[in-house]
Amino acid sequence: MKNKLVIATAMGAALALSLAAPLSASAHVTVSPNTASAGSYALLNVKVPNESATAVTTKLELSLPTDTPLSSVSYVPVAGWTAELVRTTLPTPVKVGENTITEAVTKVIWTAETGFEVSAGQLQVFPLSIGPVPSVGSLTFPADQFYSDGTIVSWNESGSGAEHPAPVLYVNDAPAADHHGNDSADDGVSAAGQTGVDVLARGFGIAGLVIGAIGVTIAAVALRRKAS
């Protein structure tokens, strides 16, 4: 019985160490690519990871700028999700090129159908076409992520080290160090930081497996000695 307990304890330690680091890393709602040229029409991928271990993501509301409105906004249909473009009258008419815009799409809402929600460990991507991109430093797209347990996470913060940073598209400004929204796996974490997290996670995982293997080996030897 004692030897079985040693084996169980060793394997439990290995599992805990191998999972601890990966679970501690968090992902953010981002847009990819996170850069675009002024005057262009950009196809963005709005990346939405699920950060809850007990609830699923059921809806995302992405707000678009009203001070520099986009005259063209369209979405690519995503299986299992409905999309709604919310148009509103602008507080003040805005001139875009030769046109004066009095209303624009100010929000895009994606809602999951039953069975298509984003579960733990999953990532949903929503393609969105916008343009022409205004000649500004950057565009910020605050987002509200809705979970099945009633929780709403607002990605609307700015500044270095923000816990819930808003998705940002950089136009004339250089991308911030903590807003890498390209095709890297960080979804808002710097590439170097993500590499460090990955290395640390792998290190803990390997250490856990080694400890577990040692524990199992010791227990096995003890069992053989007892049997002989």
Image (spheres, helix red, strand yellow):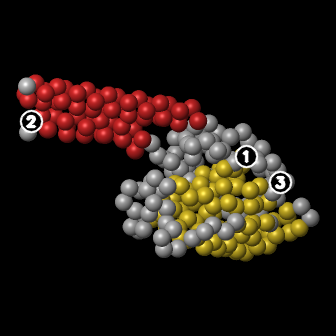
Question: What number of labels is visible?
Answer: 3
Which label number is shown at residue 40? 3
Q: Is residue 141 above or below residue 221?
A: below
Q: CA distance from mark 1 to mark 3?
A: 11 Å
Quadrant of the image containing the N terminus: top left
Inspect the image, locate mark 1, and give the three-letter code of the amino acid beneath it. Thr
Q: Position of residue 45 (x, y in %)?
A: 66, 55
Please say if the residues under marks 2 and 1 sit with CB atoms less than 8 Å apart: no
Q: What residue does disc 1 label?
A: 35
Please give left or right for residue 140 compared with residue 190 in the image. Answer: right
In the depicted view, which residue is nearer to us: 151 or 121?
121
N-terminal of the pair, mark 2 or mark 1, is: 2
Q: Nearer the viewer, residue 24 or 143?
A: 24
- Please tell me whether mark 3 sits on a helix, a strand or a loop: loop
Q: Dot 3: few (<14), some (14–19), or many (≥20) neighbours within 10 Å?
A: few
Tell me where residue 13 appears, x and y as whole percent. Answer: 26, 36
* Rendered image quadrant of residue 75: bottom right
Q: Which mark is residue 2?
A: 2
Label 2: how many Cα within 10 Å (few below 14, some 14–19, many 20+) = few
Residue drawn at point x = 36 percent, y = 60 percent: 54
Q: Quadrant of the C terminus?
A: top left
